[in-house]
Image (spheres, rainbow, N blue to C red):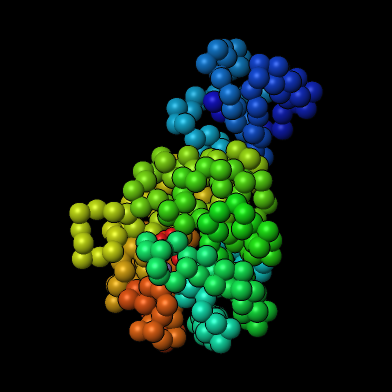
Amino acid sequence: MVVVLRPSPDKEKLDSLILWLQSKNISIHQVVGESKVILGLIGDTSKLDIDMLHALDIVEDVKRVKEPYKEANRQFHPEDTVIKVANTQIGGGSLTMMAGPCSVESEEQIVGIAKAVKEAGATILRGGSFKPRTSPYSFQGLGAEGIELLKIARKETGLPIITEIMEISQLPLFDDIDVIQVGTRNMQNFNLLKELGKQKKPIMLKRGMSATYEELLMSAEYIMSEGNENVILCERGIRTFETYTRNTLDLAAIPVLKKLSHFPIIIDPSHATGKSALVGDLAFAAIAAGADGVMVEVHNDPAKAWCDGAQSITPDTFRGIAKRIIALHEFMKTL
Ligand code: PEP
Ligand code: MN
């Protein structure tokens, strides 16, 4: 249930309303927006008398929230979530370009790519150190060493870093990481999500390859319900009957998730297509559909990449695509 308060509510009346609700075992998520204060009520609200709440003079409106996700719900939080990451921000009209290799391979590789993507306009460096691979015989990532190499690349370029966590035991290694990525295969690793909810760090939650919007938002709710509001959603393609592309990019996710929730949305056209030649066009489509940014795999030598070479673009190609993304993002603001 959502209780919208009248502007500048009387503090004593508000405190006594909150105390009364708490006495009914309802927890309150208070959102102070630019023009309104909203109380998001979490718990069993079925026995609350809506008419009685309506009658209070500090209350403007009361709405039942039928969706199972509450803190992730746009009704609880009408304003867009904007996340500060080092010297950049995600959401709130900013353009986020995350770029870098699928996996960190060496210092020379990650630093070289970091410099190139930064020069082209990237705002965040990506690179996997713990890789969830379909085959146990494939390269599994450099692990802790890869994390150290990402930090070197950050120091060299000033770009904040995002990298994927696969399990709770790896958390101490992520202390100094700017954004933690939860991959498609772990979207419903609820214990991991709860632990990440206890952090203050931004978490980018990738949509499970067969997950519905509601399931994705329930996973975001796991993180938020533990106290971490810094959630970014990422659509990276879903499984369909089509096999030409690695996955199918669900562009509808952008307007739908923006309507249902308040999180910034990033599109990953690399994993969505599996084909480097398609990355640019889908990135442009994502920006035109209102995404807050993209995550793109870039490799200095895609043919020799240890992971996901077929979908990786070169720094040169990235430069051309980034230029058009920036122009398109500016143009969208004028419409
Ligand atoms: C990745 O970003 O490297 C990755 C493994 O992505 P996903 O979880 O979307 O497959
Ligand atoms: Mn990859």
**Vertical arrangement, residue 142 with respect to residue 262, above or below:** below
- State which image quarter holds ligand 1: bottom left
Residue under the image location 79 percent in, 23 percent down: 12
The mark total stands at: 0
Residue 125, compared with residue 251, is above or below; it is below
**Is residue 292 toward the left or the right of residue 199 in the image?**
left
Most foreground residue, 115 or 263:
115
Residue 78 rendering spot, x and y as whole percentages: 54, 41
Tell me: 153 left or right of 308: right
The image shows residue 118 at horizontal and vertical percentages of: 55, 80
Q: What residue appears at the point 52 percent right and 16 percent down from the top-left corner?
A: 46
Position of the C terminus, as image quadrant, is: bottom left
Q: Nearer the viewer, residue 112 or 121?
A: 112
142 horizontally vs 85: left or right? left
Residue shown at 48% from the left, 39% from the top: 218
Q: Residue at x 52, y 65 (%)?
A: 130
Residue 267's quadrant in the figure?
bottom left
Quarter of the image with the N terminus is: top right
The residue sitting at the right extreme is 12
Percent x, y of residue 82: 59, 55
Can the viewer see residue 88 in this picture? yes
Instruction: Using the rendered image of the protein, determine whether residue 261 is visible from the camera's viewpoint.
Output: no
Q: Position of residue 279 (x, y in %)?
A: 34, 72
